[in-house]
Amino acid sequence: EIKSLKNLKSLILYSNAISGSIPVTIGQLVNLEYIDLANNDMSGSLPDEFFSLENLKYLYLGENQFEGSISREIGNGNFHKLKELRIEHNNLS
């Protein structure tokens, strides 16, 4: 189960034809600094728990089918360490 990987710093699953949504348990991976889920078939909205990852520096979600709004969550201050955000080719606003 993903929540047992509490010391994980990088999650790189780029271009693996992964479908489905991001599990809410990702918020329990508090040491994550790098997430690359780009170029998959992922969909749905980004779970609120996703935005509690305060150590996140690089976030790549481009070329999926995510939808919904992220502007409020990005601006709430939890992503103060974020250096790079790639969300192109989704249905996010």
Image (cartoon, rainbow, N blue to C red):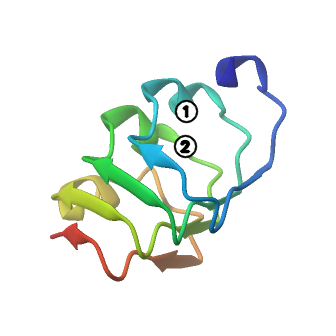
Q: Which residue is mark 2?
A: 53
Q: Residue at x 74, y 40 (%)?
A: 31
Picture layout, residue 71 above or below residue 83: above
Q: Quadrant of the C terminus?
A: bottom left
- In this view, the residue farthest toward the right is 7
Picture layout, residue 60 above or below residue 66: below
Q: Which residue is mark 1?
A: 26
Disc 1: CA contacts within 10 A as few (<14), some (14-19) or many (>=20): some
Q: Which mark is residue 68?
A: none
N-terminal of the pair, mark 2 or mark 1, is: 1
Picture layout, residue 65 above or below residue 43: below
Q: Which is closer to the viewer, label 2 or label 1?
A: 1
Secondary structure of residue under mark 2: loop
Q: Nearer the viewer, residue 44 or 55?
A: 44
Q: Residue at x 39, y 41 (%)?
A: 20
Q: Residue at x 52, y 31 (%)?
A: 27
Q: Position of residue 92 (x, y in %)?
A: 21, 67
Residue contact at pointers 2 and 1, CB within 8 angstroms:
yes
Residue type of the residue flagged with mark 2: Leu
